[in-house]
Amino acid sequence: MKTLFLVLILISGTCFADSLNDSSIYNLKSEWTATDGSKIQLKSLAGTPVVIAMIYTKCKGSCPLIVSKMQALEHQLHSKVVFALFSIDSAGDSVDELKHFAAMHHLDSNNWRLFSGKEASVRELAAALDFRYKKEANGEFVHSNLITILDATGVIRLQQAGTNFNQDKIVEQINAI
Amino acid sequence: MILPLVFGLIFLPVHANEEIAIPSGNYAGFYKDEPLFIHVNSFSMNRYPITNASYMEFVKANPDWRRSRIKRIFADKQYLRHWKSDLLSSDPQSPVVNVSWFAAEAYCEWRHKSLPTVDQWEYVANEGGKNSDAVNELLFDWYSHPNLSPVPSVKTGYKNAYGIVGLIGLVWEWTLDFNSSLVTSEGRGEDSGRDTLFCGASSSNARNPTDYVKSMRYAFRNSLKASYTTGNLGFRCVRNQ
């Protein structure tokens, strides 16, 4: 009986692993480094809705603006939502840089995750999100301003471009997840 | 005397992985805010676009990339639609088309190579700055005609000064950073959304707006998403030193 139970658990486990939605961002295999130094894949974010932005810490223009809009969103939401920032500056943004950025912007570590990754990881995530970017000769980036809302399984539910987000629409979408 | 030679050229099997060494050099950037001359390091590039036959080897070795198994995030529904089935391709010596950026990149990685960057691709297409009126005419002629279906053999493509075949005239090709085109400094305050970027920036910010054929190429890259597949878009790989 016990064995049967175990087998059932194993089967359901396998089914769950296979049931990852075909369109889920969590199918990506790229590796990222969290601010605690741990290496993760995107699927480790599964389980709650996630608000994603791709930024870099030396960005003086739109990135801080996007982060502050995400913070405003955080205050408006009552359910558990993770806010994830992925650096596009593989060469410039080490874990220390990201920690410093988090401290400067008072990003509460319970809801916020910051990641750095190799160029290939950035390229893969950017491709999946349709985020456009180019590194210029002076080390600055030209890039899309984009936030993406993922549901708990990593499927894109909403994307907004620009820096004037429609806050209410985002909240509505997240609450519907 | 010449006839057997010509026939030999046409019927010789394509050495799918044959590479050609491209020397380093400079080429003129497309956008006004780019340096006038962009330096490109030496690298090697596939002589031909990747063929259906070569791509078949890839899907045989990597079942996740078969038509029936592909995940939607990596390619849209048109993926390999011109093939008869998972392991039955058509026109083995024609460029593989209906492949997404993810698929093209996965193929090159499997060969321990990479997709060419926009700079590498444009540098080779410009033939190291020698891009002549004749080439432009050829391009213009190609762009103004509907693509042939099925796509002809890679051997029928135009051979450029480096010996690279079919870069223009057969199918469009994926680049590693296709999503870097059109994002220009003017796009920083893209409050009105990315549609503004797509439409205006490409030609208005071009160094030479009259370079129509080049504008078309940059605009096309901008219209792409990484999971898109179309019947006139293939790829080839490069090896970086």
Image (spheres, helix red, strand yellow):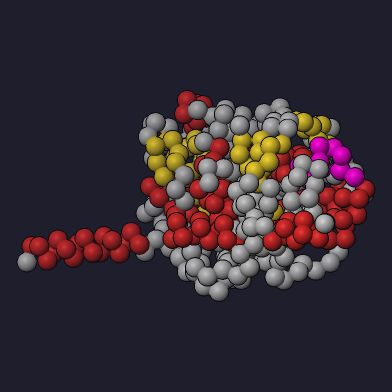
**Residue B69 picture location, percent across and down:** 45, 65
User: B90 or A172: which is nearer to us?
Assistant: B90
Q: Position of residue A114 (x, y in %)?
A: 47, 37
Q: Residue furthest front?
A: B1
The C terminus of chain A sits in image quarter? bottom left
State whether residue B152 is above or below residue A146: below
Where residue B198 appears, x then y in whole percent?
76, 54
Q: Is residue A49 visible?
A: no
- Spot the residue most to the bottom: B84
The image quadrant that residue B43 belongs to is top right
In magenta segment, residue B127: yes
Q: Position of residue B178 (x, y in %)?
A: 68, 48
Number of marks drawn: 0
In this orientation, does residue A153 appear? yes
What residue do we see at 41% from left, 45% from top? A41
Residue A100 versus residue A157 in the image, above or below: above
Q: Nearer the viewer, residue A29 or B175?
A: B175
Magenta region: which residues? B124-132
The residue that appears at 52% across and 42% down in the rendered structure is B112
Q: Nearer the viewer, residue B12 or B172?
A: B12
> Toward which corner of the image does residue B53 lie, by quadrant?
bottom right
For residue B221, side relative to residue A159 (left or right): right
- Quadrant showing the N terminus of chain A: bottom left
Task: Confirm whether the magenta stretch covers residue A133.
Answer: no
Q: Quadrant of the rendered structure where residue A170 is? A: bottom right
Dominant SS type (magenta): loop
Q: Give the residue drawn at x 72%, y 44%.
A: B121
- Say above or below: B127 vs A10: above
Q: Which residue lies at the image location 43% right of the left edge and 32% below the top edge?
A: A35
